């Protein structure tokens, strides 16, 4: 850089002016771009982290409900079991008391090991007798947890027996066994005798290890030891009912009636008091599980992310500075290329800022190395963000598959088949061949339903299964309805998912014909309409109210009607399999009947 003296005035050379001009006009934009890049990426990471965390909490809540529902299914099997009802009646009447108690304990023992995490099954009779099968005590006639429970035996009985709902008692200290403290949550229901629905003869309580809730909380995290990102659960009394540190279980940490922001601050103070995460780096998110009135709380340590962002900012600043130093010496040679390169980076940044992570900065041989380094770092970061989005999508697909499997019945096939075979031979021994035929048909139906329940089958196989199912329903209802099935031959080879239609047919038979005195007729038509397989299920029953028809058609299941839960699950299952390609429409007139029309892509492919 030289200065030329003209007329006694020192003037800078053109090169000097260009360097100065470039320095002034470049340093400010580059610094602004660095700041923009830093804060833009920070904002993107923050939003992605928040979105992933919320999805994590929603998935955790869904998994929690599905896991609890599976235990409620087992509870339902118990409190409606005729043999259990008979044994409880004998105990209440002091009939063969010792024998009846032993038989009841054997029954409970067989059920206790059918699901993981069950630690105790307890029956409290109307006379106050406690019959239990318990893993947490070495004494066979002693209940491990009831003495430590917040309610007395009589209070538990009164609370559960007052209605026909399933009661969930959140986590409380159960007992100390083998030098280990066990915390249990309990689900309970009154025993139902279908011969006398008003009779109150006892309740059934299933006690579940808190490890079940901990597993649900850890489903979407790395491990139990991960204190940088974990979930915990707080009940409707503000007590911790699942946490990575068992010693803090049942501790009250929040006012459950406070607004969500106050509760978030209370959770933040609680985590800070644990002293393993600095408050300035903690973020907490709350998902309110409405059915249980529980808070599912996510705690995330952002310290590592902030350090990486600060490091990235320093790298960007350093690269920008080095680029300027080099470019100043090559102003005349690189000005055009530099202008073009910076414009390319800025354009790509703007595209990425709009959410398109597939864009990349195009790198060529004319690009200055400093700008090329920025572009490479930026492309690398875009690639990492794209991978994070793909992982999120994959996690969503896995969750959808898990939900589909959870919607389908979980039955032990060997136990079911062996039991039905035993009953069949009992019927044959008594020359009850009609009963034997019905049981054989039922076994065939169940084998078809349970074996590879998520696979696709030809329409002909599904129709044959439906015929057996309808035959059993006709037998059970003493042939009070007739059924017409019309299937066009050309669709018999099409493939659909198994058991798609059974809930709609069952709803028509069980609920549609209820209370109607005219001849009951069920019609099922299957035909090809364009590129869709059209299935129509029509009955002349009592019909469905307009509000329910609208909720079915709009898939608005916020407050499910108990008589139609199977239909709602079936609709959800259809959309899970086929996405928005599927069409399920209800039409109904009260007093005249209901018609369900299902359009399935004829190629038989699910999403």
Image (spheres, rainbow, N blue to C red):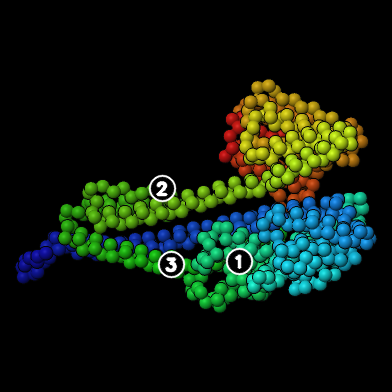
Of the 4 image quadrants, the one containing the N terminus is bottom left
Of the 4 image quadrants, the one containing the C terminus is top right
Q: Say if mark 2 contacts mark 3, CB within 8 Å.
A: no
According to the picture, the residue beneath numbered tag 1 turns out to be 232
Residue nearer the viewer, 342 or 445:
445
Identified at 79% across, 55% down, the residue is 107
Identified at 51% across, 70% down, the residue is 282
Q: Secondary structure at mark 1?
A: strand
According to the picture, the residue beneath numbered tag 3 turns out to be 304
Q: Left or right: 52 with respect to 317?
A: right
Query: Neighbour class for label 3 at 10 Å: few (<14), some, many (≥20)?
Result: few
Of label 1 and label 2, which has the lower sequence position?
Answer: 1
- The quarter of the displayed image where residue 88 is located: bottom right
Q: Say if mark 1 contacts mark 2, CB within 8 Å.
A: no
Q: In the image, which disc is placed on residue 463? A: none
Mark pair 1, 2: CA separation:
36 Å
Residue 135 at x, y = what percent?
71, 64
Q: Secondary structure at mark 2?
A: loop
Mark pair 1, 3: CA separation:
21 Å
Of label 1 and label 3, which has the lower sequence position?
Answer: 1
Q: Left or right: 231 with respect to 2?
A: right
Q: In the image, which disc is placed on residue 358? A: 2
Identified at 73% across, 45% down, the residue is 415
Q: Secondary structure at mark 3?
A: helix
Q: Residue furthest top?
A: 489
Q: Select label 2 or label 3 by which is in front.
A: 3
Of label 2 and label 3, which has the lower sequence position?
Answer: 3
């Amino acid at each position: 850089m030289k200065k030329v003296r003209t007329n006694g005035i020192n003037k800078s050379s053109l090169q000097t002016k260009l360097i100065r001009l470039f320095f002034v006009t470049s340093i400010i934009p580059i610094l602004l771009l660095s700041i923009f890049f830093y804060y833009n990426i920070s904002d993107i990471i923050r939003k992605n982290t928040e979105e992933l965390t919320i999805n994590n909490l929603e998935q955790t809540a869904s998994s929690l409900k599905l896991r609890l529902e599976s235990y409620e299914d087992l509870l339902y099997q118990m409190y409606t079991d005729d043999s259990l009802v008979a044994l409880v009646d004998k105990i209440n009447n002091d009939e063969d008391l010792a024998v009846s108690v032993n038989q009841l304990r054997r029954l409970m023992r067989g059920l206790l090991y059918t699901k993981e995490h069950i630690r105790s099954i307890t029956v409290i009779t109307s006379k106050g007798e406690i019959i239990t099968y318990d893993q947490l005590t070495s004494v066979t006639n002693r209940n491990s947890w009831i003495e430590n429970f917040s309610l007395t035996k009589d209070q538990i009985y009164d609370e559960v027996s007052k209605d026909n709902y399933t009661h969930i008692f959140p986590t409380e200290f159960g007992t100390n066994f083998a030098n280990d403290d066990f915390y249990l949550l309990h689900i309970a229901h009154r025993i139902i005798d279908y011969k006398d629905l008003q009779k109150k003869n006892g309740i059934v309580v299933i006690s579940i290890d808190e490890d079940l809730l901990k597993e649900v909380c850890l489903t979407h995290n790395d491990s139990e030891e991960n204190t940088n990102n974990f979930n915990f659960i707080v009940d409707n009394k503000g007590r911790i009912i699942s946490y990575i540190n068992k010693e803090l279980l049942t501790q009250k940490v929040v006012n459950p009636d406070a607004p969500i922001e106050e509760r978030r601050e209370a959770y933040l103070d609680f985590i800070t008091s644990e002293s393993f995460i600095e408050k300035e780096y903690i973020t907490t998110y709350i998902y309110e599980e409405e059915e249980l009135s529980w808070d599912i709380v996510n705690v995330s340590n952002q310290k590592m992310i902030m350090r990486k962002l600060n490091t990235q900012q320093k790298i960007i600043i350093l690269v920008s500075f080095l680029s300027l130093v080099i470019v100043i010496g090559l102003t005349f040679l690189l000005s055009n290329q530099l202008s073009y390169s910076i414009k390319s980076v800025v354009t790509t940044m703007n595209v990425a800022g709009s959410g398109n992570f597939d864009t990349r900065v195009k790198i060529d041989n004319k690009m200055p190395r400093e700008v090329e380094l920025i572009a490479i770092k930026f492309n690398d970061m875009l690639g990492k963000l794209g991978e994070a989005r793909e992982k999120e999508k994959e996690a969503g697909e896995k969750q959808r598959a898990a939900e589909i499997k959870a919607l389908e019945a979980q039955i032990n096939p060997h136990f079911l088949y062996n039991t039905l075979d035993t009953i069949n031979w009992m019927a044959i021994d008594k020359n009850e061949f009609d009963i034997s035929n019905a049981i054989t048909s039922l076994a065939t139906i169940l084998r078809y339903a349970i074996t590879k329940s998520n696979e696709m089958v030809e329409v002909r196989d599904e129709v044959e299964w439906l015929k057996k199912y309808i035959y059993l329903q006709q037998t059970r209802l003493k042939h009070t309805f007739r059924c017409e099935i019309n299937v066009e031959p050309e669709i018999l080879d099409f493939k659909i998912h198994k058991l798609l239609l059974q809930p709609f047919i069952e709803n028509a038979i069980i609920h549609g014909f209820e209370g109607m005195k005219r001849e009951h007729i069920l019609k099922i038509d299957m035909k090809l309409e364009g590129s869709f397989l059209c299935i129509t299920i029509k009955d002349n029953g009592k019909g469905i109210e307009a509000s329910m028809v609208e909720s079915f058609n709009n898939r608005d299941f916020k407050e499910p009607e108990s008589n139609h839960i199977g239909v709602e699950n079936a609709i959800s299952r259809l959309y899970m399999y086929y996405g928005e390609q599927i069409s399920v429409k209800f039409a109904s007139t009260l007093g005249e009947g209901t018609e369900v029309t299902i359009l399935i892509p004829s190629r038989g492919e699910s999403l």
